[in-house]
């Protein structure tokens, strides 16, 4: 991106009218974002070139605040029309900041909007990893804030979801995620009042040691569901390595490098 394009993008979103008063305003935003090529993956687009702090203040916060506002002020009919506009957008895939905001602020979303289940399945697919998993610990402004572009975590905290998604998130945390992803997903599940009791009981039973963070990456049969409860198979050969990894994650001394999958910024969450 040359200097002129950089300044144009910065100025465009810096002076954008985020005061949405009707679904037509929402449609205007979607059209503008599509035209500028930022609708599906704003950070991976030219907005990345305006810098981390500018991206956070000129895109992430305004998008989330605008959606929060319409969720409070629009009629149910207008809100439903706006959600459809936001989610269908360009090729039926919106920027993670949009779905994340809807999960946080739209009353009854997504359970009361079954017609949009396809978009929840994109956030937490049944048979593969989420396209958004790479952002789960992405810290744009290290000194000031660590924030998430990871709808699965917001989904894990929501009491407005079908519990099948909570099961899906937990099961993926067993053999899919990196240690700090597992940490973050399971903490989120533990805060959810509709989390399946088998998951809560497993976390509670193992709360005084690192076992609640165990991952079965090699699918060695570490976990089994017996009598409707999760049981840890203490006899698998890899148990020592599994426990070592979990203890490091619990102590925030696990591997962290510039590869986002390993949990950049995880040390900030230690303060929680």
Image (cartoon, helix red, strand yellow):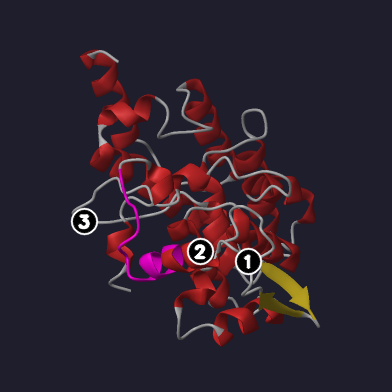
Badge 3 element = loop
The image quadrant that residue 269 belongs to is bottom left
The range drawn in magenta is: 245-257
Is 134 drawn above or below residue 154 in the view shown? above
For label 1, count other residues whose C-alpha is less than 10 Å away and answer few (under 14), some (14-19) or many (20+). few
Number of numbered discs visible in the structure rendering: 3
Q: Does the stretch in magenta take in 251?
A: yes
For label 2, count other residues whose C-alpha is less than 10 Å away and answer few (under 14), some (14-19) or many (20+). some
Q: Which residue is mark 1?
A: 236
Q: What's the residue at 43%, 59% (across, down)?
A: 180
For label 3, count other residues whose C-alpha is less than 10 Å away and answer few (under 14), some (14-19) or many (20+). few
Residue 168's tag is none
Circles 1, 2 touching at the beta carbon (< 8 Å): yes
Q: Which residue is mark 3?
A: 144
For the residues labelled 1 and 3, the Cα–Cα distance comes to 42 Å
Q: Position of residue 64 (x, y in %)?
A: 44, 51
Q: Quadrant of the N terminus?
A: top left
Badge 1 element = loop
For the residues labelled 3 and 2, the Cα–Cα distance comes to 33 Å
Q: Which mark lies nearer to you, 3 or 2?
A: 2
Badge 2 element = helix
Is 237 drawn above or below residue 88 in the view shown? below
Q: What's the residue at 40%, 34% (across, down)?
A: 43
Q: Does the stretch in magenta take in 262?
A: no
Q: Which residue is mark 2?
A: 242
């Amino acid at each position: 991106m040359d200097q002129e394009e950089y300044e144009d993008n910065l100025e465009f979103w810096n002076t954008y009218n985020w005061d949405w008063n009707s679904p037509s305003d929402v449609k205007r935003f979607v059209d503008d974002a599509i035209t500028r090529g930022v609708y599906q993956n704003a950070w991976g687009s030219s907005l990345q070139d305006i810098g981390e702090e500018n991206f956070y203040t000129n895109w992430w916060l305004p998008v989330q605040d605008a959606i929060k506002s319409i969720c409070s002020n629009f009629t149910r009919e207008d809100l439903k029309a706006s959600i459809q506009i936001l989610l269908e957008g360009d090729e039926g895939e919106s920027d993670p900041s949009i779905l994340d905001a809807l999960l946080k602020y739209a009353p009854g979303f997504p359970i009361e909007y079954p017609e949009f289940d396809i978009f929840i399945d994109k956030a937490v697919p049944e048979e593969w990893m989420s396209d958004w998993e790479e952002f789960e610990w992405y810290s744009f402004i290290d000194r000031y804030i660590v924030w998430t572009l990871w709808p699965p975590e917001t989904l894990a905290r929501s009491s407005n979801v079908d519990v099948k998604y909570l099961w899906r998130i937990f099961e993926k945390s067993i053999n899919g995620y990196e240690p700090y992803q597992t940490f973050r997903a399971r903490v989120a599940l533990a805060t959810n009042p509709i989390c399946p009791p088998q998951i809560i009981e497993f976390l509670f039973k193992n709360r005084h040691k690192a076992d609640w963070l165990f991952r079965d990456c090699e699918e060695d049969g570490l976990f089994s569901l017996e009598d409707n409860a999760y049981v840890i198979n203490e006899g698998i050969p890899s148990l020592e390595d599994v426990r070592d990894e979990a203890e490091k994650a619990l102590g925030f001394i696990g591997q962290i490098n510039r590869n986002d999958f390993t949990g950049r910024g995880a040390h900030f969450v230690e303060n929680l």
